[in-house]
């Protein structure tokens, strides 16, 4: 690999520490957007898991077909708590035939998602990724602002805590989704 390093052109900014004000604004907006988007996209899953939307009931997974490359297509039967007729639905691809769980039927009536604590934790996995990603943004902002070493160290410590919290949330959500 070192044989090729002389062929690479290294470009470093000649005027300061990184991009200019416009570039910094664009980077911060992209960073925030990428980290907040998972939370925005998971709102329907949270509403479903907490019972604010959908119909409560029981999901029985009837079959799971192997689609190859680790992908599965699972079908189930949703029985509403209200006593209505059972509805054929798509089940989560991480299900197994014979699973019986508390679930919420989507308003569209085509899919049933886990309800209660398991559903909330599963829905929290994606926002956990965003939380972990945004943890070090304060450090970058302080660095660009020319803040002192003590303030930047505090931002690094806070960033470590925030990123660790995001990691724990993501792992808990994934464990809930796949259990």
Image (spheres, helix red, strand yellow):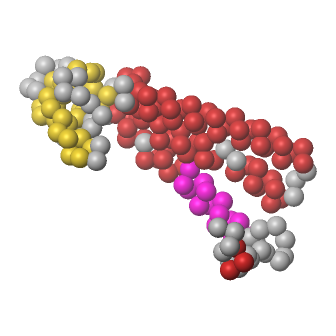
Q: State the image coordinates of residue 48 (x, y, percent, origin top left).
A: 34, 33
Q: Which of 77 and 12 is in front in this view?
A: 12
Which quarter of the figure is the C terminus placed in? top left
Q: Nearer the viewer, residue 150 or 66?
A: 66
Q: In the image, which residues are magenta? A: 21-35
Total numbered labels: 0
The answer to whether 104 appears left or right of 36 in the picture is left
Q: Main secondary structure of the magenta part?
A: helix
Q: State the image coordinates of residue 133 (x, y, percent, origin top left).
A: 60, 47
Furthest toward the front, the residue is 3
52 is higher (above) or lower (below) than 131: above
The answer to whether 46 appears left or right of 127 in the picture is left
Q: Can the viewer see residue 160 in this picture?
A: yes
* Displayed quadrant of residue 77: top left
Q: State the image coordinates of residue 146 (x, y, percent, origin top left).
A: 87, 58
The residue lying at 71 percent from left, 41 percent from top is 159
Q: Can the viewer see residue 104 in this picture?
A: no
The residue lying at 20 percent from left, 41 percent from top is 66
28 is higher (above) or lower (below) than 105: below
Which quarter of the figure is the N terminus placed in? bottom right
159 is higher (above) or lower (below) than 99: below
Furthest toward the left, the residue is 85
Magenta region includes residue 175? no
Magenta region includes residue 26? yes
* Displayed quadrant of residue 73: top left
The residue lying at 80 percent from left, 60 percent from top is 144
């Amino acid at each position: 690999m070192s044989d090729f390093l002389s062929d690479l052109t290294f470009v470093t900014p000649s005027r300061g520490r990184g991009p200019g004000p416009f570039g910094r604004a664009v980077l911060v907006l992209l960073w925030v957007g990428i980290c907040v988007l998972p939370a925005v996209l998971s709102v329907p899953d949270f509403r479903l898991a907490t019972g604010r939307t959908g119909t409560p009931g029981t999901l029985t997974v009837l079959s799971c077909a192997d689609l190859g490359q680790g992908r599965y297509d699972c079908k189930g039967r949703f029985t509403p708590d209200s006593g209505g007729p059972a509805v054929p639905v798509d089940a989560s691809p991480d299900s197994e035939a014979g699973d019986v769980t508390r679930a919420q039927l989507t308003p569209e009536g085509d899919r049933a998602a886990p309800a209660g604590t398991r559903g909330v934790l599963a829905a929290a996995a994606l926002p956990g990724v965003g939380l972990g990603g945004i943890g070090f943004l304060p450090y970058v902002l302080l660095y660009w602002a020319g803040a002192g070493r003590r303030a930047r160290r505090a931002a690094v410590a806070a960033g470590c805590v925030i990123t660790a919290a995001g990691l724990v949330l993501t792992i808990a959500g994934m464990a809930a989704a796949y259990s």
